[in-house]
Amino acid sequence: MVFFKGSTDGRTRLYRRAISINLEELSETFTIFGAVRNESGNITTVPFKTDGEFLGFIIKRKEL
């Protein structure tokens, strides 16, 4: 499992676009989550969506 985010908000959005463009291929091998801040201010993960606003990303290799 790997967590990553951009050094700036713009870089994080760039990563989101790169994942979105390649989502079909990436989803064959990886489960992808986005890190978000919930209502209570804690950071949690949600399934990746191409239009989501994320603080970072978690990618986990699928079990074979």
Image: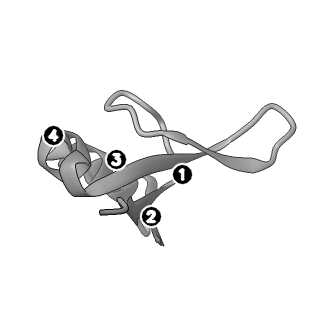
Residue 5 screen position, x and y as percent: 44, 64
Residue at the spot x=50%, y=44% of the render? 54
How crowded is the residue under tag 1: few (<14 C-alpha within 10 Å), some, or many (20+)?
some
Secondary structure found at label 3: helix
C-alpha distance separating marks 4 and 2: 21 Å
Mark 3, residue position: 13
Q: Residues within 10 Å of mark 4 (few under 14, many from 20)?
A: few
Crowdedness of circle 2 by 10 Å Cα count: few (<14), some, many (20+)?
some
Q: Find numbered disc 1 in the image and state the secondary structure of the residue it sits on.
A: loop
Give the amino acid type for the residue marked by disc 1 in the picture: Leu
Q: Residues within 10 Å of mark 3 (few under 14, many from 20)?
A: some
Q: Residue at position x 36%, y 27% from top?
A: 51
Q: Is residue 2 left or right of residue 23?
A: right
Which label lies toward us, 4 or 1?
A: 4
Say what amino acid the circle numbered 3 marks: Arg
Q: Nearer the viewer, mark 4 or mark 3?
A: 4
Residue toward you, 3 or 5: 3
The residue beneath circle 4 is 24
Gap in Å between the C-alphas at discs 2 and 3?
Answer: 9 Å
User: In the rendering, which numbered label is found on residue 55?
Assistant: 1
How far apart are the alpha carbons under marks 4 and 1?
22 Å
User: Residue 7 at x, y = what percent?
Assistant: 43, 69
Q: CA distance from mark 2 to mark 1?
A: 7 Å
The type of residue carrying mark 4 is Glu
Which residue is label 2 attached to?
5
Q: Quadrant of residue 64?
A: bottom left
Kindly check if marks 4 and 2 are in contact, taking CB atoms under 8 A apart as contact: no
Pointers 2 and 1 in contact (CB under 8 A)?
Answer: yes
Q: Given the current orientation, which residue lies at the most extreme front position?
A: 64
At which x and y percent is residue 9? 44, 53
